[in-house]
Image: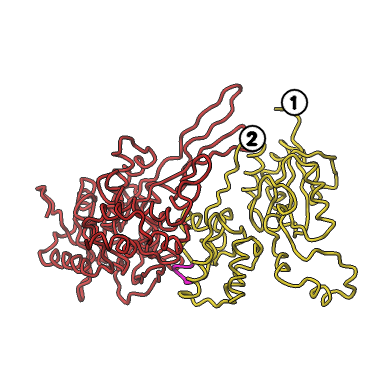
Chain colours: A red, B yellow
Amino acid sequence: MSKKKDASPQTVTLPSNDLSRLFQVLQSRGYTILGPTVRDGAIVYDELDSPDDLPRGWTDEQEKGRYRLKKSGYGTYFSFAVGPHSWKQYLYPPRVRLWQMHKNGTGFELNAQNGPLKKYAFLGVRSCELHAIEILDRVLLQNGFEDPTYKARRKEALIIVVQCTAPASTCFCASMQTGPKAERGFDLAMTEVADGERHYFVLQSGSDAGREIVQELACAAATAEEIAAAEQAVKAAAERMGRTLDTHGLQAALYANREHPHWREVGERCLNCTNCTQVCPTCFCTTVEDITDLTGATAERWRRWDSCFTMEFSYLHGGSVRSSAGARYRQWLTHKLASWVDQFGAFGCVGCGRCIAWCPVGIDITEEARIMCAETVNQ
Amino acid sequence: MKTKRKPKLAVWKFASCDGCQLSLLDCEDELLDVVGEIDIANFPEASRAVVKGPYDISLVEGSITTPKDAERIHKVRRASKVLITIGACATAGGIQALRNFQDVDQFISIVYASPDYISTLNKSTPISEHVKVDYELRGCPVNKYQLLEVISAFLNGRRPVTPSHSVCMECKQKGVVCVMVAHGTPCLGPVTHAGCGALCPSYARGCFGCFGPKETPNTHSLSEWWQEELGASKGDIIRAFRGITAYAEPFRKESEAYELQ
């Protein structure tokens, strides 16, 4: 599969019993492993010590406004779709101190340092999530300026994809052409295969760091049958997408329907609670908060995630520009599926379905976009 | 700084449980900084020493429930440059505002042996219904960090950072799993003002709405979802909105809408 010629095989097979070796290799290289684990009735991302922390035997059932953790009945480690967390929380943390200032006689001292960063290995990145990271790269690294917070974290992160074999009914990455198979942009990609008696991972490296890890694991080269079984597992996932979104002509249709009465109708249901934007792996809006201590000798500036669903977000002198919930929903949806393309050259949506499942009142971006554009597309 | 007169702070109690005042005493580590920067001129929960007004900052806890208090609050206002209400009682009428939905004379005749001794208003009302309030801090009780934030903002002449968005934003930024979506637990978080740090959802409980309605709360959509998808009864919905901030207008209207059905 790999175009590069190398003495060692680039596609290898790791028996599932040896998954702990991958953990050991990563840990010996100084990585803190982040990945999926079961907590509070969901599969979330957290620090992992060993494969025992993975959601082995668990899966999820997702619908609009609903997520349920369930026993899968299988011994597989990665038979679930994305949960409420995303890698954004590590690459672009919810709260970051930008600087601290101390009064010093008649002047002041500036401290813009934060503590040392951990070297993270992201284990279990899905293709939709990898595309979300690429979108954040465009926004935060390649958009004429670089965000130092994001850049430092992104540079350190080792990305280990686990190809998706269990999409949820809220998933539509196939429509957005962001999955289910990750083709590039990773250090390592794994596909879990549970094939009758056998349970193994097909590993493929995608970078020098990934190649070194594969070498150290010293696994056998994957056989043609194993590679085919892995390919088939991912291909089957593409056919099990619970949702679709026709992106053909979508941008123009959304612009044409900016006064559609349905925006108001969605506004009546929308709680403007911000959940969709917080779980979205590409929403990047932030605000800054300045605080002082009681004495006024120390001041700090913090950056935290914001949302286009708050009133303050569009507050200009005199009031909020987008005062109705319908206007705020329109801003969000048309940014994701239309104006993002003008700004950054691609959709701001990767079809992960988080906003559908984690909306407390089940507002479905695919359904709303379809209604909004129905007449235009049919013309 | 040292030669400057320290601002005088007074704490006033109306109909309340004293919990918000205790949040100030609870500051422990920060309390020395507080007394270093301000003169606590009147704070019965902490000290019997009383310094005469006027006061630079008055923190008012509690709601107005008696004719006497309805007069006293005007005296407090006159003696205060800045008046900040702290907590659900002072900003929304508190849990005692449940009386506002019932006939108070009936309660009195049933509960008290000599109803004539009782002098009370038939409604528990927030301070802002009686005098001009400069800043309202939400919570039952208030969050001590928010209380310190408001005091230090006023001391430093800046705007306090107490955002009015939903509790959901605090949950998500903390990484708390949504109790409504993942467990099917009715939660007031999507319509409730942030500030508690998502305390109840962090312990897998639905939000009780202690901080009152957030900006632009869509209570109707939330209760419809509870009814249709989570199997909540009309009674459940009335009880949920009729809690600590029952008399705050958006919550009051929502519970009344279900009562009329």
Which image quadrant is residue B240 in?
bottom right
Q: Picture coordinates of residue A116 (x, y %)?
A: 42, 40
Q: Earlier in the sequence, mark 2 or mark 1?
A: 1
Give the number of marks.
2
Q: Picture coordinates of residue A41 (x, y %)?
A: 44, 68
Mark 1 = which residue?
B3
Which residue occupies 48% across, 51% down? A323
In terms of secondary structure, where does tag 1 sit?
Answer: loop
Mark 2 = which residue?
B156
Q: Picture coordinates of residue B61 (x, y %)?
A: 73, 53
In this rendering, is residue B111 above or below B88? below
Q: Residues within 10 Å of mark 1 (few under 14, many from 20)?
A: few
Which residue occupies 40% across, 43% down? A117
**For the residue marked with disc 2, what is the amino acid?**
Asn
Residue B3 vs residue A305: left or right?
right
Q: Name the quadrant of the N terminus of chain A.
A: bottom left
In this rendering, is residue B46 above or below B180? above
**Magenta region, residue range:** B180-185
Residue B237 vs residue A265: left or right?
right
Which image quadrant is residue B29 in?
top right
In this rendering, is residue B160 above or below B61? above
